[in-house]
Amino acid sequence: MPEKNAHRSLVGQLLILTVAMFGFGFLLVPLYDVFCEITGFGGRTNPEAAVVAEAPDLTREVRIEFVTTVNSYAQFEFAANADSMTVSPGKMYYATFTAKNLAGEHKIAQAVPSVAPSGAAEHFTKIECFCFTSQEFAASEERAMPLQFIVNPELPDYIDTITLQYTFFDTAPVAAVLEN
Amino acid sequence: MTRGIKKMTTEVMDAHDMHDDHSPAKGIKRWLFSTSHKDIGTMYLVLSLIMFFVGGAMAMIIRSELAIPGLQFVHPEFFNQMTTMHALIMVFGAVMPAFVGLANWMIPLMIGAPDMALPRMNNWSFWILPVAFGLLASTLFMPGGAPAGGWTMYPPLVLQTGDAFPFLIFSVHLLGLSSIMGAINIIVTVINMRAPDMSLLKMPMFVWTWLITAYLLIAVMPVFAGAVTMLLTDQFFGTSFFLAAGGGDPVMFQHIFWFFGHPEVYIMILPAFGVVSEIIPTFSRKPLFGHDSMVYAASCIAFLSFIVWAHHMFTVGMPLTSQLFFMFATMLIAVPTGVKIFNWVATMWRGSMTFETPMLFSLAFVFLFTIGGFSGLMLAIAPADIQYQDTYFVVAHFHYTLVPGSVFAIMAGTYYWLPKWTGHMYNETLGKVHFWTSTFFVNLTFFPMHFLGLAGMPRRIPDYSTQFADFNTMASVGAIGFGVSQLLFVWVLLTSKKGTKVTAEVWDKPPGLEWTVPSPAPYHTFETPPKLSDADGFH
């Protein structure tokens, strides 16, 4: 029957479309990463150490603000040693953060950074950061952790304040944290 | 496997061919194993009505709690379960199945086809739904209660759902599966089974809007299924799609969700546009003004729906250029929507209008949906949206598009085609009373919410500051009134067979092939394809 063949081929095409769109949903995950890296969307910064030559632009000052959050499932204290600092673009700076393990046992933590406004993210380069790797803490250990960064002189003129935000996570799955 | 299903379909169709002048099977078997588009359409509509009352009961709990400040009836946790379940049930249980039911009943009759193209799959796509809602409803009795993190299921909050979590995910999977199968069925029926001289542009608007809707469903339901699958693997299989600690990004879920979610809102409104485009010409006694421009407008809306999703999430932070893009793209949707509103008004212009119940609901649709459209334009303005985000202004906006929008269109369609289904005229007086009480109370419920939202009352909160008391009391009175009015609707439906018998045409020369078959529509119709010249409305 010609009608049945027509049904069969159209249903086949529509099923292919359905499967393709299911795949597209998962393809959005890497696409989103690429999109964020290109545009600075989501306030993402470089995930690994970068090497940048210094070229100080002393005519300009940018205020860097540090915001720290501890995830509700992580038993930590975590704060920047200074709330903010004023920097010149193109010059290297150091900042220190301190974290303390409040649990009576060994913990592995991970700091996840985010920069706002998003237009600043691609111009904020971390030379060294405690967020590049997970951090191990012995029971009740307190430790200072270094950050070394440089603000690219090509930072758009309209940005005079950059906020660097860290959230401190316990890397154990949430279920395991809740059991303890 | 596929071959097995195909073989079954063939056998069923052969059986039909052999017994085509027999009446349907008796008792429960007629409904369980039905492959008739009319039976399945009826089942969809009945399920949708039941779900409308289940979701409505939850709305009554929400509005009772909010009637006066303070906590009086329910715990905040249960209140959150109610808002979440109300949304899931109304979206997936009431509005979507109602339109699929209307499509099942009317599309074959409107295009001159004997049945849907894939009758056995049609049966499956219906019977999956009660199972899915059984799973979803069972979560109310589980430790930790039903899902309470909002129907948008944002992580990480949704991952704190108790035992209900996997049930939520699987019921969404099943609902998606049912929608996709229904959509495939509709596309194949419309593309392959039209009467020989019905070209695509001669199709009635209801068929057109459903064809576009079906493509939207196939495009976005699988993406939604993928997103909730990622939630499932994040929770149980150690992935970190949305967990920041593991390198994922919770904001990404919002992007993927709204990539589905925005087309989804048009899935719920395009068939409504189709319904009123059928009704307004009948009671204006003029052909639909600008039929082809309506088709292009609906297609434009469908296309734009894919590139505006981030207007739901302006406050998560995004670059200025993105905000501008999503703001202007969203406002652009007002243009094709405006074309549609203009065409409906132009259809009525100098028409010999009468105001039967379906026409009243359609007129209210045009007027009240436009209010929802205007508040949508206000929300599209990125700098203003930061003030409106997550307030009752948003609640007012989408309820205006969904209740006097989609739900009124469903009721209009039900009254319009009910005599075709039953062969009897419903009680017109009670229908009009139902219309006027519904319209009064729906405005009493949702109009004050605009003011509450502009004054800053947040949504999804069981208690509020005393300054919001008066408007909330008004909204609660309106909600109870609207709920009670719907009992009248049920009464009209239950007594619909007691009215006078109607002719095949039912109304005054209504356009469309569905009015060429007798009323009630016989179990088998259009076994030989009709000629368009037999019906009104084709030129």
Image (cartoon, grey):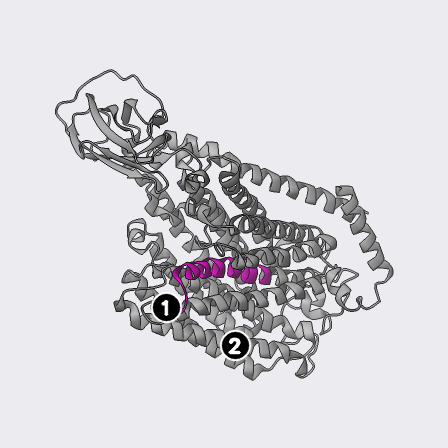
Q: Residue at x 74, y 54 (%)?
A: B120
Location of residue A63 in the rendering, given as x and y in whole percent from the top left corner: 17, 33
Residues at marks 1 and 2 on the same chain: yes
Marker count (numbered): 2
Q: Residue at x 66, y 57 (%)?
A: B126
Per the rendered image, the range of residues in magenta is B73-98
**What secondary structure characterizes most of the magenta part?**
helix
The one of B394 and A154 positioned closer to us in this rendering = B394
Residue A124 appears in view: yes
Element carrying mark 1: helix
Looking at the image, residue B20 sits to the left or right of residue A26; the answer is right
Residue located farthest toward the front when viewing the structure as drawn: A104
Looking at the image, residue B37 sits to the left or right of residue A45; the answer is right
Looking at the image, residue A63 sits to the left or right of residue B12; the answer is left
Q: Is residue B77 magenta?
A: yes
Location of residue B403 in the rendering, given as x and y in whole percent from the top left corner: 47, 66
Under mark 1, the amino acid is: Leu
Residue located farthest toward the right when viewing the structure as drawn: B18
Q: Is residue A65 above or below residue B342?
A: above
Location of residue B369 in the rendering, given as x and y in whole percent from the top left corner: 44, 64
Report the chain holding disc 1. B
